[in-house]
Image (spheres, rainbow, N blue to C red):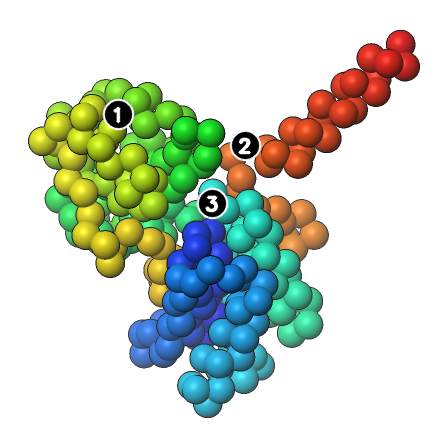
Amino acid sequence: MKILAIETATMLGGTALFDNSAGLIAELRLNVKSTHSERLMTGVDHILKQSSLTISDIDFLALSIGPGSFTGLRIGLSTTKGLSYATRKPVVTVPTLEALALNFSYCKYPVCTMLDARKNEVYAALFRWDGDGFRRLLHESAMPVSKLAETIMQYIDDKVILTGEGTLLYRDKIIKYLGERALIASPEKMAPSPENVAILGIKKALNGEFSELRSLVPFYIRKSEAELKKNVRNKTSKNAAT
């Protein structure tokens, strides 16, 4: 079973080809100042050609569904939907913060994954390895680092691994609030990988957990600025009408 995985929730996005019997076939990741729309399809085409495969050889698609960059998630979703409609390949979605946690499989400490949510907040979730996968201690939420630190201390009384771009952005605050409990991940473990999206995607595919494309939307957690401004305009118009 071959899977094409797409991850665009962070600047370090990319794509991967994975076979559940042979393992990773190819992976492409780029942290450059260009939008995913400029490089994603080029990347997909590149790894297929370099692997001597075509899109018809793929059994299904896996997508990192969020939370993360609003623009990046929209690009990833629209690309995946386009490929699925064109090829009739089914799609599974993978929570981005869980894909990030998978960088620390079998770890004895809980893992807190954090992405920048803007407005002095992070998207965060807390996981603990439980046999053959991660169990959520804290589901995906958007909150200030201070509140996250308080929440972490409610769930654990030991050290915790912190990873993700939110960790890099708020490193000093994290250390201030958590002290010696905080174990900051090394740089190569700070981003969700397309390979991890593929690994989690295969598990969902084997369980038949495919998505309905028509109703599929990114997992934003909170509304985008455009949606908030639209709501404000609508309320203003209603008030003016009355």
Disc assigned to residue 30: none
| Residue annotated with mark 1 | 149
Q: Which residue type carries mark 1?
A: Ala
Other residues around mark 3 within 10 Å, as few (<14) / some (14–19) / many (≥20): many
| 3D distance between C-alphas at marks 1 and 3 | 20 Å
Residue 44: x, y in percent? 51, 74
Where residue 92 sits in the image (x, y, percent)? 51, 57
Side of 163 where 144 appears, left or right: right
The dot on residue 222 is 2
**Distance from Cα at disc 2 to Cα at disc 3:** 11 Å
Q: Furthest-front residue in view?
A: 33
Q: Amino acid at mark 2?
A: Arg
Q: Who comes first in sequence, dot 1 or dot 2?
A: 1
In the picture shown, does residue 147 fall above or below 86? above
Q: Nearer the viewer, residue 62 or 165?
A: 165
What residue would you read off at disc 3?
68
